Amino acid sequence: MIKKLLTVGVLFVVFFNGESKSQEKASDADSAQYWWGKGYVSAVKGDYEAAIVDYNKSIQLYGLKGEVYYDRGNARAELKNYAGAIEDYTNALKYLIDDPDKLKTYYVRGMAKIETLDLNGAIEDLTEVVKLSPNHEEAFYYRATAKDKLKDYRGAIEDFTKVIEINPQSSRAYKLRGIEKIRLRDKQGGCSDLSMASELGDTKVASVMEKLCGSSN
């Protein structure tokens, strides 16, 4: 998921066209771009440790680059260093100006916070995402799961309902909303949602229905 959010278009000419541009003669900004591009290539290849080394060099040379912090955060997240990723995303947000860049950074930071069980922090970040993008299905979905873990079942139902409004084919949202409804003693509504999840192709919901509704039909 995070891998798909790697910055696109940072393939710099100095790295890809074979030019042997001297780093001694290059300005700090040029050198920073070189290491940023090199780090990006390492990340695409799946060598996240090497990418982090390159991003470190870029930040040291030209620290006011939100995009570099963002990319290094992604590399750290791939290595399951979520605390380090959150730190980088926080630094990135200090420098990013455009809403699309802020949106994706709030999103990945929210996801990293879920991994560290900072559920309230995750909800805050995902709320920023839906402010910037009111139809962001994934943000509503994962905000709902965070609310569920905090036992805010009504809040989770509201978010799963929003997911269904955005994507009526979301079997996972129907399934989890159904479970939340049953927790709140709305068995009829919950079982109806579970049945819809089954109709939409969830092959594992039958066992849940049998347990919670007394039937897989």
Image (cartoon, rainbow, N blue to C red):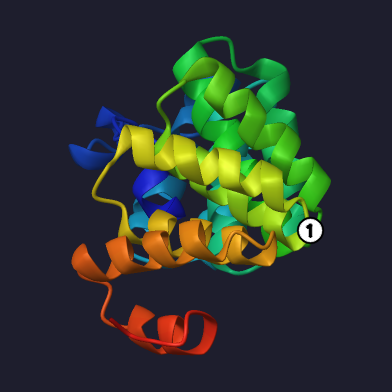
User: Dot 1: within a 10 Å radius of its alpha carbon, few (fewer than 14), some, or many (20 or more) residues?
Assistant: few
Q: Which residue is mark 1?
A: 151
| Residue closest to the eye, 47 or 208 | 208
Q: Is residue 121 left or right of residue 22?
A: right
The residue drawn where x is 24% and y is 35% is: 19
Q: Is residue 119 above or below residue 167?
A: below
Q: Is residue 31 visible?
A: no
Q: Is 57 in front, or is 176?
A: 176
Question: x and y percent of residue 72 in the render?
Answer: 58, 47
Q: Amino acid at mark 1?
A: Lys
Q: Is 110 placed above or below 215 here?
A: above
Residue 65 horizontal side relative to residue 160, left or right? right
Q: Nearer the viewer, residue 51 or 22?
A: 51
Residue at figure coordinates x 74%, y 33% from the top left:
124
Residue 1: percent from left, percent from top: 41, 55
The answer to whether one can see residue 112 in this image is yes
Q: Where's the C terminus, which quadrant?
A: bottom left
> Residue at the top extreme?
97
Residue 62: % across, % down: 65, 25
Query: Residue at point 58% right, 47% down?
Result: 157
Pick the front one: 147 or 3: 147
Residue for point 57% across, 18% down:
131
